Amino acid sequence: MMTHTTWTSRPRRIIGIMTGTSLDGIDVALCTIGVENGRHSVVLDAFATFPYSDACLELVQTVLTEPIRAAEVCDLEIALAADMAAAVERLLQEHNVDRADVDLVSVHGQTMWHAPQPHAIGARTMGSTWQATNISALATLLNRTVIGDLRTADVVVGGQGAPLVPMFDLHTLVHPNRTRVALNIGGMANCTILPPTASVDTLVAFDTGPGNVLINAAIRKTYGKAFDTNGDVARAGNVIASMFDELTSHPFYAMEPPKSTGREMFDDAYAAVMVKRYGHPSLPMEDLVRTMTECTAWSIADHIQRYAPKADDVIVSGGGAHNAFLMELLRDRLPTVNVLRSDDVGIPSDAKEAMCFAYLGWRSLAGLPGNIPSVTGASKAVVLGTVSAS
Amino acid sequence: MMTHTTWTSRPRRIIGIMTGTSLDGIDVALCTIGVENGRHSVVLDAFATFPYSDACLELVQTVLTEPIRAAEVCDLEIALAADMAAAVERLLQEHNVDRADVDLVSVHGQTMWHAPQPHAIGARTMGSTWQATNISALATLLNRTVIGDLRTADVVVGGQGAPLVPMFDLHTLVHPNRTRVALNIGGMANCTILPPTASVDTLVAFDTGPGNVLINAAIRKTYGKAFDTNGDVARAGNVIASMFDELTSHPFYAMEPPKSTGREMFDDAYAAVMVKRYGHPSLPMEDLVRTMTECTAWSIADHIQRYAPKADDVIVSGGGAHNAFLMELLRDRLPTVNVLRSDDVGIPSDAKEAMCFAYLGWRSLAGLPGNIPSVTGASKAVVLGTVSAS
């Protein structure tokens, strides 16, 4: 524990840990974060993605999809902390970084459920969200200070608990004379609209809908592959018009921001229903993957056209930035826009969310709020998270 | 966030929240905690027990007993935070205390599962424990700093995660020339052996087994009552010798300390099996309650005779201190010992655990370890808990 002024008095080495809904690994980003000429500076020093242990991944998938007992929930939180601790240790070892030099580990947690809309909970009507991992266990295993559960406070004050990346976008991507859109394509896709005048008070950001989740679910169902490398399968297929029409009529897309989504809306089960409904032995399987990819591209491009008609650049991060065909579809649907990868502006695409959570953890220890009420719908800005000191 | 020396520089007003496995309410203790002549001082300023909301209690019981979905776990954590926030607000209101004067809220959490013995979890073999409530939500709802999850760190370093009360007993109950036993009879029962020479390095403390859990389960099954007021039902019954023999042969009792237990070993289902096995239409139902009470008294007295043969005083706290018949049985089984209630030495029996958790939270913010390795079996002393700053 330390005072806020002590915390910001020198650059801090902070590890961000991101584990997305796509369950494709544990992203670990070692960053140096500080204040330079009154601006926050976030520099990536090292990054790697490590696999979950088989046992942990199985437990996560069980809790996500099956009826469970309290014992499994109890183990899940510790299993995730153990896997995350191992991932951090490997990154430090591979880059010869002394753990004593790490000031903070800031962890997103594994999203198990996200229901931010007010509903009856106990004696109150409020939202809830669950980013699993045990913070105390992670701090004890690593012998470092750890912060996590960075979405709940925003939900408690009426926010969607997401997106939180816009605070990071605002401090790292605003350009003096170009209108930018920061787009992250993970399991879900979200964007931040960044005109040169962007500020915490006026920022617009929201989830556009599925990122890789439907594409991955379709290719798993049809080809048994984890994801569509470079989008090659989708490229070989044709759009199934009726399926595209049904997919794009999902009510989420027409909702006005601020809005956020997750696996409670777009998940494997939803994709499976669509694949079953439109799949046919006479139909090339790649058509199903193509249609999911087209729906994803459409939903992203449509939101950018609706909410950032003057966009100059779309800066893409997340696993979806590796889907060359998805990137082509975005360029086709946004002909006047420069669609580039986050790497091209100094933020490696795969590392961005982990860097963001490192930054959000740094903000909390600086006593700074991490949510943007205009973006999440919260009634006020709040300091996010829960901290275990080492 | 503040430095440790700042934290201990003046007395702090700390609220402890205890919710036991017996689910009989939310105990809230407002304490003043500070350092006086080098000793820690814990003074109770106000105390009350508030009911859970019906919806929250139902959710807790569902998660404890039935297969559940991730959504219910997510809501459970928030529901408990909401109920606990309401309980704190009521206490402050009833005693005209300004919430701004509260330095910290320290919450035990609702124990949903406790499996501290090492078992396969993800990629590791370790223990796990789950004290439900969302700390970030509670801090946001109350706009105060909150600490919770005070057992996990001890489990991670190989401890049983319990008992934690002995640290509090050591600082509040040691007598210069009497050997004392601090005994808490909650859902489970635990004791701390306190010779005049007691110290963190030599302290012996452990769970003796069930506290009220079996008695309550038996009277619920037979009379539909929540508990046996004053032990009157048990007093009217006779011991069923065969049932007593089977109950007291449970292997937990013969284990050597350090040891801890919970509902995963002694629960309603275990009690129901016993009641079914020994209950008979021709048998007075009070005999079942009497036998459960006798087993509880035996297990407590037997442990005291085994591990504190020179005890002068047994100081009883927890709901069981109100069971006059259980207290009589203890006096009968411990004829040379002065069996008194915690209230008689300045620590109201019902408030003790909540006071203890207020004290443990205070210790963590002072940077002091909260576990006692000789008691929990941990490999080292660690600072406990996870903190959300307001």
Image (tube, coloured by chain):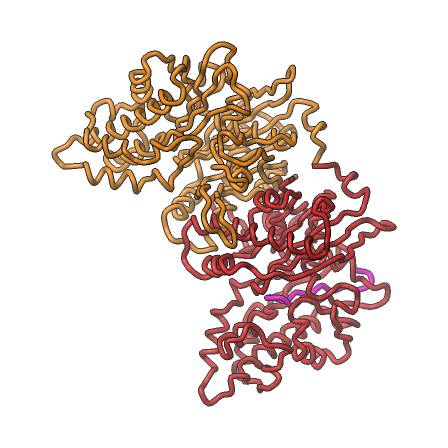
Chain colours: A orange, B red
Q: Nearer the viewer, residue A69 or B295?
A: A69
Residue B15 drawn at (x, y percent): 69, 52
Q: Is residue B51 magenta?
A: no
Say which of A207 and B251 sits in front: A207
State the image quarter where residue B165 is shown.
bottom right
Residue A4 horizontal side relative to residue B135, left or right: right
- Residue A224 image point, x, y percent: 27, 36
Is residue B163 placed above or below B249 in the rendered structure?
Answer: above
* Residue ranking furthest to the top: A177
Please name the residue shown 38% across and 42% down the image: A264
Can see residue B369?
Answer: no
Q: Residue furthest right?
A: B37
The stretch drawn in magenta includes residue B189: yes
Where, quadrant-wise, is the C terminus of chain A in this rendering?
top right
Relative vertical location of residue B55 with respect to residue B122 in this rendering, above or below = below
What residue sits 19% from the left and 25% below the top? A238
- Residue A258 visible in the displayed image: yes
x and y percent of residue A49 in the render?
Answer: 46, 29
Looking at the image, how many numbered discs can be counted on the residues? Answer: 0
- Where does the magenta region start and end? B186-198
- The image quadrant where one finds the N terminus of chain A is top right
Which residue sits at x=57%, y=24%?
Answer: A31
